Image: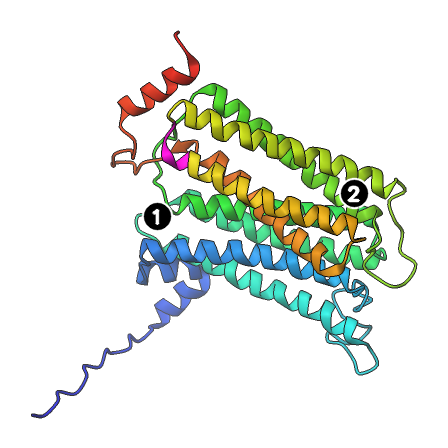
Amino acid sequence: MHKRPPTMVPVPKLTPTDLVAALRNPLAFIADRWTPQSRTVERAALAALVMSVVIVVTGGAVRLTGSGLGCPTWPECTAGSLTPTDALSYHSAIEFTNRMLTYVLCAAVGWAIIAARSQKPFRRSLTRLGWAQFWLVMSNAILGGIVVLVGLNPYTVAAHFLLATALITVAALMWQRTREGDGEPRPLVGKAVQQLVWALVAVSLLLIAAGTVVTGAGPHPGDSGDVERIDVSWSGVAELHAVFAWIVVSLTFALWFFLKGVGAPQGPRDRVRELFLILLGQGVIGYVQYFTHLPTVLVGLHMFGSCLVWIGVLRVLLSLRERADVTGDAALPAQSYDAVSASISGPR
């Protein structure tokens, strides 16, 4: 038997009008000719979230290896050269690699924007979240340049990390929004649980902020030279950081029992359990690094764990409500929500 030759798909020819349209609004041009599957949009948003964590971890590696000034200027690596020269050390390669990963992050965010813009029906909320990530990346790139130009001032380093945390926040929100509709959010729990979770979010932010102070006062300044440090007791701030960590763990533990006791939906309970396990791992790493005088590897793992903790907290917060499609049905029947709400809030 003779095999039939594969059918060739003709490549569409671009007319001058198409070229003008592509130059005028490339996103609209792509959206008119491509409709991604929902899974594709979700994966694009997840890729942006993963890269936002990767850039934090590699930034931590720059600091922990003392490579913060490996490229002593910005946006060039050295005066007159965008790349490291032969005269520079391996610190330059580490710092330059981290800078190059910013382009990978931009590509991931750009892919998320294109996928969201091309989805049918068009969801403006997703596109806005994608563009918010883009501007956060640009802002943090500029701030990263300022960090280098001011010689790793610890306050600018702390701001650099906090802005990266803001990027993770928006990326996690976009990833969540790709898996739900655009209907009005409907709470799955009562106000008491919502208030407890918002308290968890607030203390988690304090935990992260205290962690940046620990970094600014600790023994890893980011360069082997004379780098300014925050003039506070490192051990005292570390102990305050630990207090916030214990409060976060306690709130998470109480929240899990509370949700289980009132028969809350499985989704919030699963997210809280996941957060609790992340916190246990992060706590072990934190105490081991403290009593072993901050070995580089453990500090790096702790930074990675910090990102996971914050993502876990955000997932708990976002699990407290559902958003159906504009014309679709919600995942939880109304009577189930009413029963949960009544059991938590009590008689009205």
Residue at the (49%, 19%) spot, across then down? 192
Q: Residue 66 occupies which quadrant of the picture?
A: bottom right
Q: Position of residue 105 (x, y in %)?
A: 57, 61
Q: Would residue 169 be visible to someone looking at this image?
A: no
| Label at residue 149 | none
Tell which residue pokes out farthest to the top in this image: 348
Q: On screen, 175 above or below 329?
A: below
* In the depicted structure, whether residue 182 falls above or below residue 164: above
State whether the magenta stretch is mostly helix, strand or loop. Answer: helix
Residue 286 in magenta? no
Nearest the viewer among 146 and 87 is 87
**Alpha-carbon span between mark 2 and mark 1:** 42 Å
Which stretch is magenta? 264-268
* Residue at image location 84% in from the left, 62% down from the top: 223
> Which residue, given by chain and number where applicable, does mark 2 sit on?
213
The residue identified by callout 1 is 122
Q: Is residue 97 visible?
A: yes
Q: Would residue 172 be found to the left or right of residue 213 on screen?
A: left
* Residue at (56, 28) in percent of width and height: 198
Residue shown at 53% from the left, 23% from the top: 195
Q: Earlier in the sequence, mark 2 or mark 1?
A: 1
- Tell me if 203 is positioned left or right of 7 in this view: right
Please tell me whether mark 2 or mark 1 is closer to you in this view: 2
Q: Position of residue 12 (x, y in %)?
A: 28, 74
Disc 2 marks a residue whose amino acid type is Val
Number of other residues with Cα within 10 Å of mark 2, as a class: few under 14, some 14 to 19, many 20 or more: many
**Relative to residue 221, is residue 252 drawn left or right?**
left
As helix, strand or loop, the secondary structure at mark 1 comes to: loop
Q: Nearer the viewer, residue 244 or 143?
A: 244
Quadrant for residue 204, please give it.
top right
Nearer-the-camera pick, 180 or 314: 314
Q: Quadrant of the N terminus?
A: bottom left
